[in-house]
Image (tube, rainbow, N blue to C red):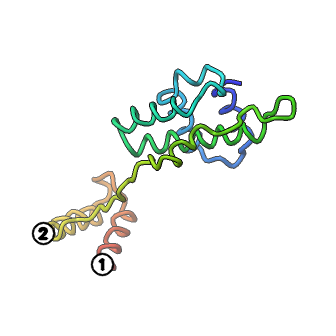
Amino acid sequence: MTLRDIADKYILARRNLKESSKADIEKHLNKSFEDWSKRPAVAITRDKVAKRFTELTDKSPAQANQAFRILRALLNFARGQYHHDGRSIIIENPVSVLSDTKRWNTIKARSGRIPTNKIGAAWNVLQSHREAPEQTDISRTLADGVVFLLLTG
């Protein structure tokens, strides 16, 4: 079975999968694993995983993590679902090399704060959006919500 075959069956089997999750799977199959998607999944080795993870990490550590979490899920699915002569077609998930060698990227959480010296300007912008929402892309409800967050911390 190719990685593409496994992904298609995974998406069908997971009926409650969010649209964004399906889109992420497609994105990584078409970009991160484009050359792997048409080949047998059993050809994906620990060495190939480690090498590709390093390549993707150089571009975006967070996207590398996401891509390989998806690959891990797909291969775990195949490991549980598909057998030949009583044995799973995937003996070991090669993505485990990332955990075994502690290579997962540490991603710092975002903290989107308004700097203290800009709170007044942000307040004025929000008030103008609240007073004339038809002149902006932001609804009054959204502006009210952000004002509430500013006031309550």
Q: CA distance from mark 2 to mark 1?
A: 16 Å
Q: Position of residue 70 (x, y in %)?
A: 57, 41
Q: Are marks 2 and 1 in contact (CB under 8 Å)?
A: no
Q: Residue at x 44, y 46 (%)?
A: 103
Which residue is situated farthest in the right direction here?
A: 85
The residue pinned by badge 2 equals 117
Of the residues shown, which amino acid type is indicated by label 1? Answer: Leu
**Mark 1 element type:** helix
Q: Quadrant of the N terminus?
A: top right
Find residue 11 and report its image quarter: top right
Q: Position of residue 26 (x, y in %)?
A: 56, 33
Which residue is situated farthest in the left direction here?
A: 117
Q: Residue at x 51, y 33 (%)?
A: 49
Q: Residue at x 61, y 47 (%)?
A: 18
User: With respect to residue 9, does 143 lie above or below?
Assistant: below
Of the residues shown, which amino acid type is indicated by label 2? Answer: Asn
Check disc 1: other Cα within 10 Å, few if <14, some if 14-19, many if 20+.
few
Q: Position of residue 85 (x, y in %)?
A: 87, 29
